[in-house]
Amino acid sequence: MSAPMALSVRGLSKNFGAISVAKSIDVDLEAGARVGLIGPNGAGKTTFVNLLTGFIRPDAGEISLGGERIEGLKAEERVRRGLARTHQINTLLTEENARDNVAIAIAEREKFAWRMMRCKPQWRQCLEEAQARLEAIGAGAIGDRRVSLLPYGQQRLLEIAIGLALKPRVLLLDEPAAGIPSSETHLIHEALDRLPADIAILIIEHDMDVIFRFAKEIIVLFQGAVLMRGAPADIAADPQVRAVYLGRTVV
Amino acid sequence: MSAPTPKPTSPLGEMTGPGRFSLVGHALPWLVIAAFYFLVDDYLGLGTQVMIWVLFALSLDLALGYAGIVTLGHAAFYGLGAYAAGIFSIHVSQDPILGHFFAIGVTALFGLLSGALILHTTGVTFLMLTLVIVSIMFEIGNQARGLTGGDDGLQGIRLDPIFGVFDFDLWGHTAYIYTAVVLFIWFVIAWRLVHSPFGRSLDGIRQNARRMRAIGTPVWWRLLAIYTISAAMAGSAGALSAHATKFVGLSVLSLLTSGVVTVMLILGGTRRLYGAFIGAAIYYIVQEWTAQISPYFWEFVVGIMLIATVLFLDGGLMELGDRGARLLGGRRRAGGGE
Ligand SMILES: Nc1ncnc2c1ncn2[C@@H]1O[C@H](COP(=O)(O)OP(=O)(O)OP(=O)(O)O)[C@@H](O)[C@H]1O
Ligand SMILES: [Mg+2]
């Protein structure tokens, strides 16, 4: 054992009533990892993210972030330790503009969101960083615009920008390209290409273009269990994987 | 809402909260309060009552408007504050300032404890729990006759002069100014709160609590904090009411009291702070008018006003001001605002 894994999961299990949505899942992400998580609808991919981030309590299993056990921590404490996520369905502050959405996350990261005074200088710094982060992801133009009026693709970019603004060591992307018209998928491709190299990333996607472009390793989830893991080429060639998933979805 | 700017043009560093006011807008309500004192001497008691309701509605705005805590239980804090101030003056000390702080302390503590018990729930469950709490408080107020006077109300409140100087006179001059000053202090606190990072995070929780959890916000703690502050403020309004009228009626703890303050706030406009002023004032003015015609007519009019506001004025009567300002060409809100 050398440096601890960025994220290490052992025996993670969860039942919803009679359905088992996570069956003793083991996953490791090293620093800077680019891992794809695929599987048919209802395989338990989003549930896996919810379990990791503390939105749902697991029945059993261990989760370590940078060597520190976090499965007992609340969602917000996991974020503080460097585990961030995006959502499959946009989860944004729709009445704010895009820049404020990022700035509010930065204020939380910088631990002054409890302040009950105005704090103009700090807030200005937040806004400046927020604007810079939007620009870094190719969305500098949307800073001033109210989120509810943004095109869906731009909202997806904003999800990622907020996740990055938390300065995570592990970022979980739940279908970043979901629902985006094909004319806009290049935005997501470019944003993914620009993600900082040191962050370990787990990406869930149905769009195989995105997965095969981005992921160095792929994990296939089926009915809550890891069916297979390996290099993208091996996954694409595997008959069993094709049977449960790729055969139907891939174009 | 139209013509989005491609690049940020508004100066960064502005804390654009909901509803930013010009100087005139800021001064207006306070000028009215001051003018009322000099011009409408005969109705100072009424003016004091309106300001007390403004403060109560302001407290609800923090919880309901900003943080999105949908409660019908705020009468519990208002009533508790009133009884605490009244009982303190009868049994402990007649110093009004001391009694006021006592009432604030008691209601803050009660807000903290009751909030800690129920704030993990949301929606209808939470609403029901607030109803339960206010009903229990009402029953306690009713049963503990020895302490509260039951349904006869709490009588015999006596107060020393404020700071030993300003006596509570029969005409209500002192009570009016005392109430205005307390309202102003709370208003400044509320204004700072809602424009602080803390206030922004509450607004975020109201819009999407899940988003806030995902950026590491301790949602429960934030809600508990604002619930406690809001309770203290409502308790302060209750204390003012006990001090101004030297009487506490059991109705302060009734569900109707919660209902009235909610109607006032929605009428005036949530998340604008000054909405509480307009809502409470209009409510009282219209009540005075229509009650002369018939008490039933009054209920009818309130119902109509509320429906009209909700249907046509998203932001309550304050929205009218916004629209007027926009017509005059002064776009007060930044592009991202609304
Ligand atoms: N809160 C819940 N209670 C009960 N069942 C749930 C809950 N959340 C998810 N499920 C079920 O768990 C299973 C896994 O759902 P999940 O959302 O994790 O799938 P997914 O792999 O993300 O699918 P998709 O590709 O459609 O996003 C589904 O059968 C779903 O119906
Ligand atoms: Mg999913």
Image: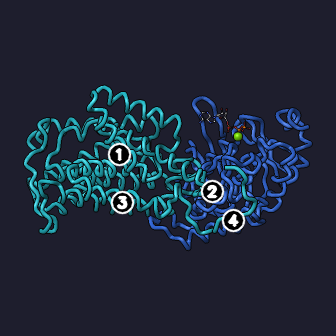
Chain colours: A blue, B cyan
Q: Which residue is mark 3?
A: B30
Quick one: label 4, few (<14), some, or many (20+) residues within 10 Å?
Answer: few
Vertical order, B212 against B133 (above or below): below
Residue A192 coordinates in the image, percent (x, y): 80, 57
Vertical order, B162 against B155 (above or below): below
* Residue B280 badge: 1
Labels 3 and 1 share a subunit: yes
**Screen quadrant of the C terminus of chain A:** top right
Q: Earlier in the sequence, mark 3 or mark 1?
A: 3
For marks 1 and 2, give the CA distance. 33 Å
Which element is circle 2 on?
helix
Q: Chain of mark 4?
A: B
Which element is circle 3 on?
helix
Quick one: label 2, few (<14), some, or many (20+) residues within 10 Å?
Answer: many
Amino acid type of the residue that numbered disc 3 sits on in the rendered structure: Trp
Vertical order, A92 against A81 (above or below): above
Which element is circle 4 on?
loop
Residue A208 coordinates in the image, percent (x, y): 86, 44
